Image: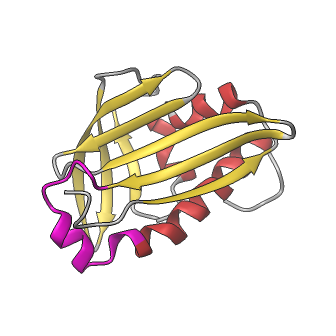
Amino acid sequence: MGDDAPQVSVSRIIPADADALFDVVADPSLHHVIDGSGSVRGVRGGSRRLALGDRFSTTMRIGVPYVISNKVVEFEDGRRIAWAHLGGWRWRYEFEPVEKGTKVTETFDPSSSKAGAYLRLVKAAERNRSSMEQTLARLEAFVTNTSSSL
């Protein structure tokens, strides 16, 4: 299905420890804090650290409110986490220690989705790029406690 809809990734060097950054992303109760799209509103359930196979549900709003269930489908502690929902596309975060902090890469990966044609039609990759850039900026602001607004 990957031929139907392109994958898009954005990266940012964040002056923080990879484990600290990973811990924020691996806690779904913080997703609404770092979400750059404005669509994630909260999580059902409390704060917890995700692991491979875990499921979590987020309250969302894109036009209308809804709830979406996700499953962690990739996991390498401190280095990579990805989740997918019923639509099949994945949100992946990768953390690579570098000299001045951590290179964080967020990827929208529709390769496992059965909705590739739809995602291409609505230009999901292009729309998500800007939101992902904002997400990484918000992640940096949250973890480094800069004066950047969230």
Residue 27 visible (yes or no): no
Q: How is the image coloured?
A: secondary structure
Q: Residue furthest right?
A: 100
Q: Residue 137 in the image: x percent, y percent? A: 67, 58
* Residue 7 highlighted magenta (yes or no): no
106 above or below 123? above
Q: With 136 as the anchor, is 141 left or right in this view?
A: right
Residue 145 figure quarter? top right
Q: Nearer the viewer, residue 85 or 48?
A: 85
Residue placed at 50% from the left, 68% from the top?
Answer: 129
Vertical relation: 14 (above or below) 118: above
At x 58%, y 34%, the residue is 24
Q: Is residue 128 above or below residue 67?
A: below
- Left or right: 114, with 48 as reference point: left
Range of residues picked out in magenta? 110-125
Examine the image and state in which quarter residue 6 appears: bottom left
Quadrant of the image for the N terminus?
bottom left
- The percent coordinates of residue 15 (x first, y second) are 82, 42
16 above or below 112? above
Seen at 37% across and 30% down, the residue is 74
The answer to whether residue 117 is magenta is yes
Quarter of the rendering occupied by the C terminus: bottom right
The residue furthest left is: 114
Which sits in the foreground, 104 or 86? Answer: 104
Q: Percent position (x, y) of residue 72?
A: 33, 31
How many numbered marks does the figure carry?
Answer: 0
Q: Is residue 37 left or right of residue 141?
A: left
Q: Is residue 66 left or right of residue 103?
A: left
Confirm whether residue 1 shows in the render.
Answer: yes
